[in-house]
Image (tube, rainbow, N blue to C red):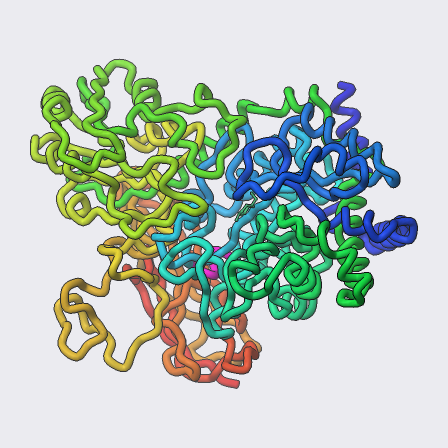
Amino acid sequence: MKILRGLLLVSSLAFCLTPSFAQQKTIAAKVEALLSKMTLDEKIGQLNQYNGDWAATGPVTKDVGNKLDAIKQGKVGSVLNIMGTNHTRTFQEAAMQSRLKIPLLFGQDVIHGYSITFPIPLAEAASWDLEAMERSARVAATESAAAGIHWTFAPMVDIARDPRWGRVMEGAGEDTYLGSLIAKARVKGFQGKGLGNIDAVMACVKHFAAYGAAVGGRDYNSVDMSKRALWETYLPPFKAALDAGAATFMNSFNDLNGTPATGSSYLQRDILKGKWGFKGFVVSDWNSIGEMIPHGFVKDNYEAAEVAIKAGNDMDMESRAYIGNLAKLVKDGKVNISLVNDAVRRVLTKKFEMGLFDDPYKFINPAREKATMNQPENIEAARDMGRKSIVLLKNEKQILPLSKDFKTIALIGPLGKAKWDLKGAWSTDVDPNENVVSIYEGIQKQAPNAKLLYAEGCKVTDSVSVDFTEAVETAKKADVVVMAVGENIFMTGEARSKANIHIPGVQEDLIKAIVATGKPVVVLLMAGRPMVFNWTAAHAPAIVYAWWLGSQMGNSVADVLFGNYNPAGKLPMTFPRSEGQIPIYYNYLNTGRPSQGDNDTFYRSSYIDLPNTPQYAFGYGLSYTTFGYSNISISKTTIKKTETLTVSFDLQNTGKVAGEEIAQLYIRDMVAQPLRPIKELKDFKKVMLAPGETKRITFIIDKEKLAFYNDSLERITQPGEFKVMIGAASNNIKLEKSFQLTN
Ligand code: NOJ
């Protein structure tokens, strides 16, 4: 009761989503008062972030001596990678011994859950369920805030069109429209009712910008792109996150057109703090200020610090560039003190908004920490998010859902009993393996009367031929086989790019051997990225793409396998047939010699040895039921740009079980200068329908959905013909209409 009363009091004092003007004014006055008391060294201390004593999430930088002493001397403004109320208390107590007692901010990569691990973000994106993703971020925020954390380095909103890049697992996939909505949902989830609430953590939108477009999909690599592509494809999710109230931004490791993002005034001053009016602060990525030296952009940390602060980077994560050089830069007259003051103001403002000056230990309450973790309703939310994230790729002869009459089920594959892997990269160690439900356990629970056999078959990493006899014999004894194959936890994530994204090792040979038994086989593919698996796509009767779904993965998968949940996920990224097709994405521009089909290669923009089409397209995913699209109508055939257009159609569940369909709206501007993509997602609806039920679905098209950037980076519309397409996937358009746009 006491806790509850405390919570109510704190939340009534806390801000609504954004602080009111009066609150802002009060905070601004407090910030100025504090700033006027600070020495230059104390100011620079606020811009310095050290790694704590938990495992480092970047290369360990040179030792700084005793960190607690540095904190007591006011030389540190924030610490990352310390978790739990015990730890954070020790550090905050040190800060309270500094001259001005400015509280520390504790940052952490809470990417997909804290104590309960949720699906990796790419998997969640496959749900297209914004509410569910907001809830997932909310749970992560609630748990991590109760562990003393103030700030998560999430969401990652980098658009990624290259599945070789290991960090595709951390984002929302390839599409700008979907990615922008997801960015917004996640920020709302993390920040809840607003900074200052006891269960809200500050979001940190990353990595600003264009990190996902690294050449060759190699992590940290260069990015070279037109400004139009940057504005059109890569920046909108950042803007959406900002509009949702994101408190902080993180810049990125890559250079953009020859300037490291960390040193880019164009990105941080002109766009983010200038045109977009961002009032929060920007933190560097881990040592990204110092990494401007190996980039060849600056010669030493002194120059690096100068470039970074001038470019608008406020806080230095682990480069030690500001703490070592900024004072001298000011004294040497190279950096104007107003730049330092501006950065410090931004950091202090967030500390005030979080309520840390009122109570630096506000987030540090061991009883609350204990009471908040692993709540049953949150575990259930993780399970629900898991099944919503699953994509059914193939289901020949309707093997799925598995019949309750099967007496013997064989689970085969190296991931069948895995636990740790199921959490996926960027999960915290707070979630112990015992909390994770394996595929084996999930199946066992939902088929208590069936005999469940298991054979590993091979290891994920086996690369030389393996004797599959035991696996084959096990399969032969069963009525149905479920195969659990894919990547292990180390195969995606930061610095885990791959040139070969086929199912690793000999696992596809194992699939071949098991399919050859003639038994009904369901292949469960688990990975943090799209993989290549052409043989399986052609020959396995049923394929379920399950990604990494976190602690509840076994239960979520079993819900789908046994039909307790009808899968509805759709791919947020294109799945190529070969690495040679990468980058591959659905919203490309037509050439002057567009491919006319998969067999037409002569003088066409096709490969001579591979179709242009992907294995599975963006937006693709099946259900245990089927859906019919009919009766499209549009409100007008000509609209002015000030008007809106309504598109309606009937969506029917034509199968025998209830199910959800994600109906997608694409638009094409038929003739435009500059060119427009062959189609672009502009809206979608996830609709639940009972068998036989029909619903009339309506989309509204407004000017913004028809607008694009011209070469001068102005947002314009051009009159002419537009095509509106309604489909079940980007390559499965069911209904079309055209209309004219006039001035
Ligand atoms: C480097 C990663 O790029 C970034 O995303 C992460 O937040 C930091 N390390 C801190 O762990």
Q: Residue at x 43, y 53 (%)?
A: 219
Is residue 595 covered in magenta? Answer: no
Is residue 176 covered in magenta? Answer: yes
Name the chief secondary structure element in magenta. helix
Quarter of the figure with the N terminus: top right
Res 574 quadrant in image:
bottom left
Q: Residue at x 46, y 55 (%)?
A: 220
Res 239 quadrant in image:
bottom right
Q: Is residue 135 visible?
A: no
Q: Is residue 139 above or below residue 710?
A: above
What stretch of residues is rendered in magenta? Answer: 175-179
Q: Is residue 113 visible?
A: yes
The x and y percentages for residue 246 are 65, 52
Decide which of 319, 79 is in the foreground and name it: 319
Decide which of 169, 739 is in the foreground and name it: 169
Q: Residue furthest left?
A: 517
Q: Residue at x 61, y 36 (%)?
A: 81
Q: Report the number of discs.
A: 0
